Image (tube, coloured by chain):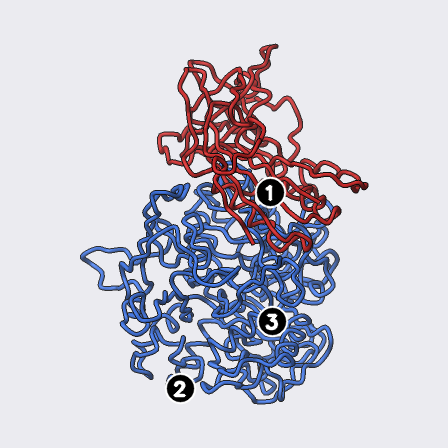
Amino acid sequence: MKNLYPLSLLALALAANGTTARAQDLAFVACPIVQDTPSVPCWLTEYEGELYYMGVQSDVSAPFNPPWLGHMALVEGTPSATGERICGGLVLDPVRVAVMPEMSPECDERLVAEPGYVLPFEPRRPPGPSSGRLAFSPPQPPPPPEPPFEPRTFPVYFPFEGAVNFQTPGALGEILDYARAVGAERIEVTGYRAAVLLTDGTVLEERSGLAELRAGQVARMFEGLVDSVEEIDVVFDEAAEPGDWQDRRVDVRVIP
Amino acid sequence: MTVKPRLSHLLLGVAVTSFGWQAVTAQSTDEAAAAIAADAGDLPNGGTAWWEPGEGRPIPEAIEYDNDHGRLRLYNVDGEVVTEGHPFFEPLGPNGRACVSCHQPADGMSLSLRSIRERWEETGGSDPIFAPIDGANCPNLPQGEEASHTLLLERGLFRIGLPWPPRDPWGEGTIEPEFTLEVVRDPGGCNTDPEYGLDSANPTVSVYRRPRMVANLPYVVHRNFGIGPFVGKTGEPALRDPENGEPVNMNLMADARVPTLGTQASDAAANHLQLLRGLSRAERAQITDMQGQLFAAQVYDNVAGDLLAGPGGNAFGPENLAHGDIGFLGNNTTRWVFPVADEWAEPQPGLTEEQNERRASIWRGQQIFHFRTFWISDSMHLNTVGLGNPVKRTCATCHGMHMTGLDTANGWMDIGTTNLPWAREVPLNPWTDEEELMPLFRVTCRDDVPPHPFLGRVIYTQDPGRALISGRCNDVGTIVMQQFRAFAARAPYFSNGSAANIREVIDFYDRRYNIQYSEQEKTDLENFLATL
């Protein structure tokens, strides 16, 4: 059975996630640019006259997932303090990139490879077949929990305006393992949406209803997978205060 | 809490093919054919190629059939299959069909357009494959007339009727679709038919798809790399095996609507054989047991000769498939998608110059498949899974499963075979009277869901594919990938039969992704694909 509640009706004393703005060095929405190289392509973007490097093409396991031509992207990142440049762009590190859902056909810039330019590192995944493994290994699973078992909350993060996607199963694995190991009786799923304060002062807010959608989708993913769970409570908080990427999330609380 | 996937009302999968076969009969006096058979170790040839339901011929451990590119071998790992009384081969339902009707050994256990046309000519349209339920454009059309069977006779397509809105696979009732569906063009007449159409008492969408191969299926239903409780490309919960609750890889049928070979068999028996009583548990087990031990692949190329001659040809032949590593992601070091070693392409003693040249071309085609990069763009569930749009990769990126070229993970995506503007359509102009055969639907995504990332809120499609099951806007036109085996035996290709031959498959990709293959590259790739 799945119970669904707006958070405001529950008066739960939840942590104030999603309500505190966290500063980003840069946060802007712009078209991505793909720059070919003799190996994998670089992904760049331009903001206020500066060209920024976001990352290279890799595979599904990579922490950086390139954006899409045909769409604007929300870029949240920190420019390199040393002025490091790759593919001509000032490196943003760390960087988070989210594809904006609406189509933007003007985002169509493809740059041919610069003659003689070689990436300053060996790409983890070449443009051809893999070497038999994913480019980035998943983190080692934590050791099995020991009693006494405690309620534990796991965050599951989403890209701006995003709900369950190809990245979500990776985040749920640890939660499933824990819930099964402790024989969880109850799971509470709390969904949030958020907003971003852009560098230019604009506040960009995720669409209304996304907190409920995220929570509902994540709750559905647990159905039938943990035999001991009799109930999954779904809670959502549609408040969207400016914050950072950690506010675009669902909290999954596993209760033994 | 348990979730029981709803499995009823699901239809048989669909799919592919290639050039027709020419059986090497026992009475053949063709010396070349005899020499071919001798080279292959005197395996029995296909004799009379067409398998009638209930005819009782056993399928030997190995049997071969000629086709336009060479010769296909079927290999039964567990030895001869007794077909008499076997539910795959017996006409269980009232329309006279058996599973074998549409999964013919000579056609790589699919059904080639050539076979379909030959059956029409030989039986005057009375063969059970032309049964009104799905062998006609719509069941209520006059039977025995070519005009009523154009989709089957011209594209090799069977009608698949799916409920609309989709049924909820996880519970009772239906899914609320993220889009509305309108019929723009309906040459078969079924989607607008008052009895069978979208506005009928049982609203039904009719799409038209090819029957898929029933061989090498352990690869299709593997539970190894990339398979878990969730679908790797979308994050949604994966369907589960009703027998044991384990997640399945959802690579069966064009739209992944059934979880297992057993449920697929039951679905096909009900919807294609019209077997109202349903398959018994024992019958289902007999069918799936046979499916698990049947492998098919080319063993002979008409120019290169015996593909298994010389070292390093581990990609070829059904025996290599049967004993290969199942459910592994191919790579370029230890386990190629299609392992053809360099030494295989070296000139082999005893072969003619022409044979050695063809072997070199086949090897180059394999290299193109693995290493020739191009920009893959605007393809749902490929560019959207962390690779970026566009992504610079190769054929082997998507067709990555060792030995089959399947997707190792749950594999539906949209490369444009059914969605406009890429789908094959008859050009409209004042100088042609050719009419498009395929239906056309207008899909309009709801305002409260994100638009399709590459096609927007209004999409025109010949077949919404997976979206007819999931109800999702971004699944419109996504089709489950098929294996690359027995290509030469089962034209036409793609789920809607839109590529008449292997070259048209290559041309589609060349056009779709602006690959700019050279003529030599196309030839090499075609020669390679024809050997699988």
Any mark on residue B262, and which? Answer: 3
Chain of the residue where label 2 is placed in the rendered structure? B
Chain of the residue where label 3 is placed in the rendered structure? B
The image position of residue B436, as x and y in percent, is 29, 62
Residue linked to disc 2: B126
Q: Which shade of the palette goes to chain A?
A: red
Q: Residue furthest top?
A: A82
Callout 3: helix, strand or loop?
helix
Q: CA distance from mark 1 to mark 2?
A: 60 Å
Q: Residue at x 49, y 34 (%)?
A: A237
Any mark on residue A188, and which? Answer: 1
The image position of residue B126, as x and y in percent, is 40, 86
Please determine whether, in this image, residue B495 is positioned above or below residue B333: below
Quarter-of-image position of residue B73? bottom right
Q: Amino acid at mark 1?
A: Glu
Q: Nearer the viewer, residue B266 or B440?
A: B266
